[in-house]
Image (cartoon, grey):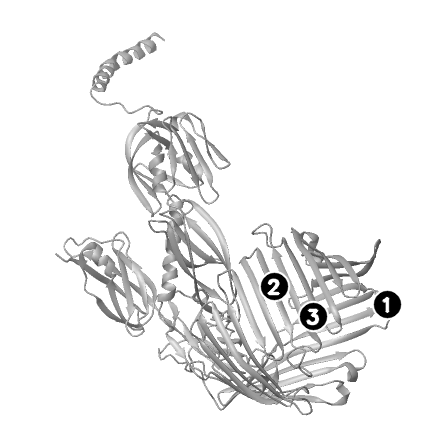
Amino acid sequence: MLPGRGGRGGTLLSLLPLQLLAGALSATVPRPPADTEPEPVILELQLGRLASRTVPAFRVRSEALVPMSEFLQLAEVGYVLSPEGRIEASIDPGGRKLVIDARRDTMSYGDHRVRLEPEFRLFRNGELFVGAERLGDLLGVRIVVSWADLTVVVTDASGLPVGRRAQREAARAAFRRRFAGPPPELALALERPRWDGMVVDYSFLAPSSGVGAGGAYSVAVGADAFGGSLELGASSVGRLDAGVARIDGSWTGVWRDSRWLRQVRLGDGPVSGPNPWIQRGVLATNAPFVRPSFVGTTRYDGRLEPGWALEAYRGSELVAFDSTDAQGRFAVDLPVRYGENPVDFVAYGPFGQIRQFNRTYRVLSELLPARTFEYGVSGGVCRTPQCAATTNLDLRYGISPRATVQAGFDRFWRDTLPDLFHPYGAVTVAPTTTWGIELDGVGGALARGTLRYEPSLDLRLMASYTAFDRGTVAPILSPAGQRSDWQVLGFLRPIPGQGFFYLESSLEQAASDAGTITRARLGASLQANEVRVLPYVRLERDVTTRGFMGVSTSVLPRPQWGPVFGNVLLRSSIEWQQAGPALVRLNSYALSAARPIGPATRLEAGVSWTRGGQGATLQLALSSYLPMLRSYTTVTAPAAAPAFATQYVQGSLLWDRRDGRLTGAPGPSLERSGLTGRVFLDENGNGRYDPGEPTLPRVRVLVGSSSATTDSSGVFRVWDIVPFEPILVTVDSLTLESPLLVPVYAAASIVPGPNRFRTLDIPIVQAGVVEGQVVRAEQGGGVGGVTLLLTERNSAAQRTVTTFSDGGFYTLGVKPGDYQLTVAPQVLEALGVRAVPLRFTLAPGAQGVGRSGIEIRLTPTR
């Protein structure tokens, strides 16, 4: 053992000169910091690709301590930093409070807490530094530290105010592009054939007994004839076994682009003007066949603090935006449609603050766009016994977006009674976005006034009064014996945003020669989970006063009830009547359960009882909504009468002349249209389907708001679209087998004709890749972030491409055609360079379609 000890001692002695040398070197070379000693460094702080800044920081082991004031400024968060090292901030949405204190070992963000060890927090020179990993845990973001690149990167900053601002800017850019996009590459106008297509609507009602007494039928045939909609129909009148039928026929022509004559109807149909009356004659008008829902714009202005931005949304769609001026004022023009226009406003402050509020704008259906004149004139034979012949002249003019006037007259000729002449006039005004006033009068018939107030979806009030003329013999446009009526309606949602919690009320009175009757009702709606309850009380007063109270309930399907009962919808109602000062009796009740028993069939069973009726009544209903028809079968079994059943069937038959195919639809289908065609691979590029070219199955075709998927033969078919109006047709590119297959036309506009299918074949072509690089002419290095514009010279269709960091670029799905590739003008101006546009042609070849090796050279302008 002595040699061992001696050997080891010798080794230690031999190391003494090295230790002395290391001690001498340590006096001149700095030692690395201890693990917990912060080392000052300079880092690049990056919030995704949105913002970056070079900041002073500290290193502790592998962790980076970032300056919180710099981080919050970059994230666009307002903050307060105390002299003691406590930083506080409020981050929207939700106003979540962020608190980090250099003297505490826990930091908080809303209800979230994260431990912060002493070595990972530092307050020095008036700045608070926090460990990046702990900060990421606190904010719920991933922060990556790279000491090789000297960077601290927040990989996804979308949850921070700066990220939400970038999302808003992208939405605004998309909003601007929505109005600046190119028109459809293919536009097909309305065809006006002499005869094409055929539609048959039918319906039949048959009771289980006494079909001749209780049955009914109707059948109507329609076609596209002489450029319009030709219709001929017959329906039973009275008892079926009496053999009496009503025959109706009409032809309607539409010229949507004409200014003075847009519709003509010959035959049976409603008269022009505001009064519903049926004639057999002629009608002419310049009113559109389908009135666009978009009316115009209404201006909304207000005030916030300077530096704020405001966005307006309808649902989830951005419809307008603005920023405040130096005085904090803003103004937006909101697009409005007929009916209710609920708009949600979101205001954003300069440090991520968020404020939200909403407004509702109701556009009355009687209003016309500003400076719009419409007329209607009609005349013919009356289809009811009240008159022999009738004529109408109707004139309307939109004075402004908020005021419309109307005037005209109705004339009725009668056989034994005096003829009637009713001049009329109306004024509809919306003085503000929350108020609406309607005044109208009909000579020899009535005078009416209506006032509406609707500041939001949570509050609605309406009051109206009508006085009837009593000097007209056997009136047509007003009820006989009626003197006056008035009503007041109200709706209130006490808690905004709680859609199924509301109160509603009504109070109305009608006076006639038979007396006066007053009705009042107060109801509510409550919902908790799947259960909805609607209690109410109502009052009726004429000679006597009757009070009622009741409640209706519904229980939505609950999957946790199992496969049998999980799809059952339960509904019930019960009502009591006050029969005396201290007597309340049951007036009626009903209970039902409904359940789907297939993809298109529904079974409902229930029981009901009404005082004075036939006792408790059992009911069973089976409804089917099939591709060919719809069917309703009901069985009713009263306690005091024999049971009986009824069967109702409704449907349509559609004939497509192109392929001679007869199909069905649930209907009704008269004066509706369809679109059919095939999706095929256009191998020779002539835009037409040629025998032998392959068709493409399982491709989704979008036709307006409808869609269809091609079958195994590449054929699609869509029915029930509006005729005479253009509709947009596109292909869902995600359903194509390859990203290098693209439709020849990105979008096509087509105007279908009535009562028939219009044919549109959709060619698909092989597309390719365009790739290359943008370089500086003098250095030859690639230039990143350059926006390029690739324009098809014939159609003017354009796409944008942005270069990568090395200047390279590529874009997929470029169709054959003549192209020009240019650098965006704003990029040239910002870089102070010029570039020569590059023109080239893409054509199918042995190697496919595409162009590679493109080089765009940027040359300094001076």
Residue marked by disc 3: 623
Q: Which mark is residue 639?
A: 1
Q: Rounded to the nearest whole Å, what is the CA distance between mark 2 and mark 1?
A: 44 Å
Residue 536, percent from left and from top: 71, 56
**Above/below status of 598 relative to 159:** below
Q: Is residue 160 left or right of residue 819?
A: right
Q: Is residue 521 left or right of residue 252?
A: right
**Of all residues shown, which one is farthest toward the left?**
862
Amino acid type assigned to the residue bearing label 2 in the image: Ala
Amino acid type assigned to the residue bearing label 3 in the image: Ser
**Closer to viewer: mark 3 or mark 1:** 1
Residue 84 versus residue 295: which sits nearer the camera? 295
- Can the viewer see residue 625? yes
- Can the viewer see residue 699? no
Name which residue lies at 61% across and 87% down. 412
Residue 418 versus residue 857: which sits nearer the camera? 418
